[in-house]
Image (cartoon, rainbow, N blue to C red):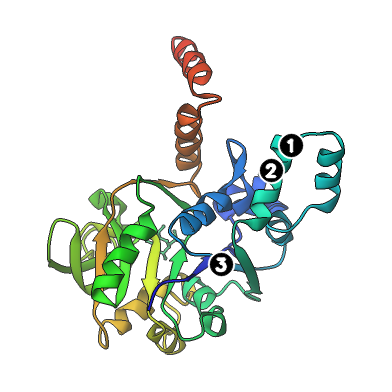
Amino acid sequence: MKIKRAVIPAAGLGTRFLPATKSSPKEMLPIVDKPAIQYVTEEAVQAGISSILIITGRGKEAIENYFDVSFELEKILEERGREEELAVVRKIAEMADVFYVRQREALGLGHAVYCAKNWTAGEPFAVFLGDDIIFSETPCIKQMMDIYDEKKCSILGVMDVAEKDTSKFGIIGGKEISDSLIEVTNIVEKPSPQDAPSNTAVVGRYILTPQIFEEIENTKEGIGGEIQLTDAIKSLLKKEKVYAYRFQGKRYDIGDKLGFLQATVEIALKREDLGEIFKQYLKELLKKY
Ligand code: G1P
């Protein structure tokens, strides 16, 4: 079965980015001129996924408005002959079929993914965490979909991290099949370096089989008092194979202030309209620091 659906949990409170996230969703913070959530949506669309379910919560209405038609704005742009801007605005509403479900309480990532149970209709699906923006020639999720086509089981997107950072991630343990592929035999949410099975971390890309929902149902509160997706994957391991894939690409944690700044600067430098002038500016600026 092909992966046709993607789930984007976006109900989190964004506490790492207060006060900006007090009244606007962290997913709408702009990186240059596009909100963060559009980068992950574009990754899904580029991989051929056109049905996207966003798990929202209270205060996230701006996300729904963003992917909707903006009647007044479009009318004004049309009247003023601003064709270029009009095309940009219209494309957003047309890029994918976007659906929404509300997670009524912030009970953790596992619980958020569980909200997608009915919508995924018994099919395997992709999960994108909006804090992780990944740039690569082939979209990260497409690289993982290719492995899924071969293995027909859950695939986790992973990268190696510094040992001191294991407590920020879900960490896997397993058998290295090749440089990029690992058969997962263990997974632990945010272990200390002493307890970590390796330094290979799950970043925000998953392909999951529908069996995950039964595992989430049986998952008790884990670290932080939350229903952890990692714990559900750990129990999935007892029933199905799970592989981890070291994707090609660069990942930014934009939920972190430094990661957000890094993504902003690097994306701006890559932009045709801004790159050169911004690079000159940075060079001059850095002489003073
Ligand atoms: C979540 C997951 C964790 C994963 C991480 C990737 O943690 O629970 O397993 O490694 O995303 O960014 P969070 O960063 O939401 O605390």
Q: Quadrant of residue 206?
A: bottom left
Q: CA distance from mark 3 to mark 1?
A: 27 Å
Quarter of the image where ligand 1 sits: bottom left
Q: Could you say which quadrant of the image residue 238 lies in?
A: bottom left
> Which image quadrant: the C terminus?
top left
Looking at the image, residue 231 lies above or below residue 75: below
| Residue of label 3 | 52
Q: Which residue is mark 1?
A: 83
Residue depicted at x 56% and y 79%: 115
Q: Residues within 10 Å of mark 2 (few under 14, many from 20)?
A: few
> How packed is label 1: few (under 14 Cα within 10 Å), some, or many (20 or more)?
few
Please determine whether, in this image, residue 61 is positioned above or below residue 20. Answer: below
Q: Residue at x 54, y 74 (%)?
A: 112
The percent position of residue 198, horizontal first and vertical second, equals 19, 61
* Disc 2 and disc 1 in contact, CB within 8 angstroms: yes
**Which of the pair 272/253 is nearer the observer?**
272
Residue on which the image places disc 2: 87
The local secondary structure at tag 3 comes to strand
Q: Which comes before the other along the chain, label 3 or label 1? A: 3
Amino acid type for the residue under numbered disc 1: Glu
